[in-house]
Each structure stands twice: as C-alpha cells, then as structure tokens.
Image (cartoon, grey):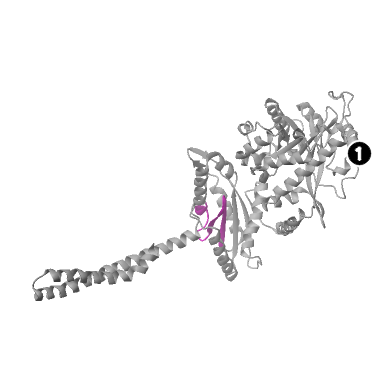
Amino acid sequence: MQDKRTAISPGIVIGCGVGAALVWLVILFVLIDLEQATLVVAGASGFFGAMGSGIGALWQTWSARHTTEYLARAEHDASHDALTGLHNRNALFQELEWSYKRAKETDTVLGVLFLDLDRFKVINDSMGHEAGDELLRIVATRLQSAVRGSDIVARFGGDEFVVVCRDLLSEKSVLAVATQILKSFAQPVSLYGGVQVVSTSIGIAIARPDDTRRPKDLVRDADAAMYKAKKERSGYAVFDEVQRMQVIDRLDIERDLVKALDEEQFVVFYQPLIDVPKKRLYGFEALVRWNHPTRGIIGPGDFLPVAEETGMMARIGEMVLREACAQAAVWNHLTADAHGIKMSVNIAEQQLIDANFPYLVSEILAWSGLPAEQLVLEIIEDVIVDHLDGLTILRDIRNLGVNLAIDDFGTGQSSLSYVKQFDMVSALKIDKSFIDEMGDGSTNRAIIEAIVAMAKALDLRVVAEGVENETQVRGLLDFGVDIMQGYLFNKPVRSDAIDPVVWFKPRGNDEGAARPGLTPLEVSRALAVQAAASGPNRPPRKG
C-alpha cells in the first residue's frame, strides 16, 4: 500500500498542475471579454500550478514518511515474535552470530540460556489456549525485566525461550543471570482469576574466547543442559564435557536409527508377570532392545528418547506390537495353558495422538489371530495427562476388547480427578521407584497403600514392577498386590528362551488358592530356569 503511494507521487505533482490548467480553460470559454479572460487565466494558472505543486510536494513528503514507517514496521515484524514481541528464532541466530564474533574480538564470555516452562502444556490444555498465550506474554515480560539491558531475549518456539548474555567478564556472570531469572519465576502468576505457580528449567552453554563451537551449537548444547536440569529438577544446569560426549553419542545413535528398522535390528524381549498367590504366570511385558551391529544389545533408555524426537517411535511401536501379538498367538497354538496369558505392550506418545491407531490395533489382532482380551496396552501416566484429548482413542481401543493399563503410576502429574476420567483403564502399574524403598514407616509404603486402596475403590487391578527381594513381595502381598514383575522372578528374555511347557503350566495344587509359606524363589524356580539364554549381554533393567 505504502509502496504504491511512493510510485504515484510524481504523477500527483503533474496531475495537480494539469488539473488547474483545465479548470481555467473552462473559465476561458465562459468569460466574454477575451483580454480579461487572458489575464485571469494567466494569473490563476500560475496560482493553481503552484498550489498543485505544493499539494504534490505534501503528498510526496507524507508518503515517504509513511513508507519509512511501514518498512520499519515490516522489518520489526519479520524479526520479532507476534505473540510476545520478543526476537524470533531467525533474529536470535543473527544476533548470536554477531555476539559470538564480538566476544572473540573483545576477549569476553558469551552465555546462552535455553528455557523451557514446566507443566505449560497442562495449563494450556486445562485453561485454554488464550490462557496459555497470556502466560507466554507474562513470561516474556518477566524475562525482559530479569536480564541485563544488553542481553537478547528470544522466543525459540512454543514455551521455549533463549537468552543470550554478552560482554561478560566471567562465567559467574552467566550464572547470576540464570539465578535472577529463576527468582523472577518465584512470584505466582495471576491468570484469568486464578493463581498459577509457573517454574522453568534452564540449560546453560558458556562460550569462552577460545571456544571452537559454532554459534548454533551453543543453542543445541544449552538445550541438552536444559533436559538435564529438568530431569534433576535443579533449576539450571551447565553444559559440560560429559554432556558433550553424550551429544556426540546421541548424534551417532540418531544416524544409525535411520537404517535400524529397515535392517530389522530391533528385537523384542519378554519379562514375565507373576500371579504370586496362584503360583502361576500371569503374562508378559514386551520390551524392545536394539541389537546394534557394533555396540551389541542397547537398552531402550539409550535410544527411545532419540526415536521419539526424530519421529520414529510410532514405527518402532508398531513393530513391537506386531511381534508381541504374533508371539502370544504362537504360544496359544503350542499349549492350551497359554490361553488367557496377557501380553503387555507399551504405547508411545506418537501412537496415542494418532486417530488411526485403533484401526492399526484391530488390524494387527486380526492378522496375528490373538484374542483381544489377551492384549494389554500400557500408557505412561504423564502421556495420558498431556493428551487428554486422546482418551477417545483409548476408549475406541477398549471397545475392541483390549485391556489398558497406566504405567509408572504415581510418578506423574495426574490427580484423583484425572484418574476418574480413565474409566477405560483396567489396571495400574506401580512404578519401580516406590518399590525400591518401601520399608516400614517409609513415605513410599504409604503411597503404595494409598494407590492400592484407590485402585480397589475404582475396581482396578494393581501390578507392581521392579520387585527384587522377598521383603518387597511380602509387603506387597500384605497390601493386596498379587501381580508382580521384576528381576527376583526373571529378567527379560528372548522368546526362544521361553519353554511353553515349563513356563505356562500352573504350579499350585489348587489354582485358586495360595500355599502358605510360598516364597518368590520357589515361584521363580517353578516358572523357569534362570540360565544365560537371553543373549550375550544382560539387558538393562526395565522393571
């Protein structure tokens, strides 16, 4: 619009002069006295010509001024986030490039802080996107007030922010900025009539004058440190040499993952779930391992987070689901004792948000021939809370006859109000962290007791994972927990290490009654010989 004004401004100047002349030519034909008309026309033409030139000049000046304002505004909009007014990602990297060069020239320290809001998604989903946007604007204002005037604050995307601290004399100055930011978050936020406590996790990457990293690597390293801070709940964490090696290793894993699926390098291990009072196998949990061509067996904790971030988790999850269902169906054909044995498979976040996932489950069940009631799909507690809109998908799966369980229960963000919405769930799995420390009088013991009481009230089955000693078994039995899994009973093994005749046969004289004095060791020996039949390396513990 403003550029058009600039283009037509010269025409306005000429047009005003021509217009004035035409007006007085009309007057010429109206007036009778030719000499008088000539004088009038000559004088008036000069006057209106000057007036036209003045009008054109004013237009030119006004247009130029507004064009400059328009260009400045367009330039600002291109480099700033529309919601918060902070620098956007592109402007951040431009400023970071300049700041990095300046730090080299002036022999100063450069700090990059990567921030991620804690529990933002919960607030955004529960209170609405407008509340989420308002919260981001409040956070942006607090960040700008917490940093120094020379620092750059940018919105990196979503609820992630980056602060560039420049012209620093020491590394302590970077930590001082991080501390000041954390203090600014201590004040509760008033949001739509309610009060919310919002916290953040900060990752810090520090570039010294002799640093050889590229500017964009500093953002990557600060991001990696942020995840460490979030995991340790430490407020902030500084990227160090250990993390540098982890980043390099992560890049190698990311590269190798691309061909791992195509070359069928993923394998499925099975860890038994034991019905201790009945002295029999209750089911299996299918656990994926990566049989890397040079590294050997790699546990899920070393590659699944990378698979999730690179978008490969859904493909891996489908592979595990297919193989687990097919294996359970094979066991059904081999022995009648396998009928009714549960096969548990973990659902990834990418699968839960896929509207076509129930159709995939139905197709795999039909393809494998496994009865739906034998399949149990496990969903991590936090994944459900973060995707409450996925409850419809879970209900569709439950309508197929498939059982659903909440994994790692007690470690996430859910409350009783959330659990009441999980009407399609049939079981809760108590996280290993609670089982590890459940001595008399411990807080974990009280938590387990509360979980079991809640589960019974909601008619949910409880499974304890990570059981490793007889004391834990006796305590869990006292609470009324019958189904357990853990290294006390058996580690995860390959399918070829499982003898259906030995593993699936009930061991009690009366299948429905527990024999007094039964020990976990007796259960373990009755179910399988713990031989080194699970592969060259002992897989990392899942539970």
Q: Position of residue 108 (x, y in %)?
A: 59, 66
- Residue 41 in view in this figure: yes
Point out the stretch of residues depicted in magenta: 143-167
Q: Is residue 334 above or below residue 306?
A: above
Foreground: 433 or 27?
27
Residue ID at (57%, 53%): 157
Q: Would residue 268 be found to the left or right of residue 60 on screen?
A: right
State which quadrant residue 431 falls in.
top right
Q: Is residue 173 magenta?
A: no
Amino acid found under the numbered disc labelled 1:
Val
Q: How would you rate the neighbour count of disc 1 (Cα within 10 Å): few for under 14, some for 14-19, many for 20 or more?
A: some
Percent x, y of residue 486: 81, 38
Which secondary structure lies at badge 1? loop
Instruction: Give the labeled residue for mark 1.
Output: 529
Q: Answer left or right for 141 relative to 394.
A: left
Q: From the top left corner, tell me how far across and down residue 182 is, in percent.
A: 57, 49
Q: Is residue 148 magenta?
A: yes
Does residue 489 show up? no
Within the image, what quadrant is residue 462 found in? top right
Relative to residue 1, is residue 480 drawn left or right? right
Q: Position of residue 316 (x, y in %)?
A: 73, 48
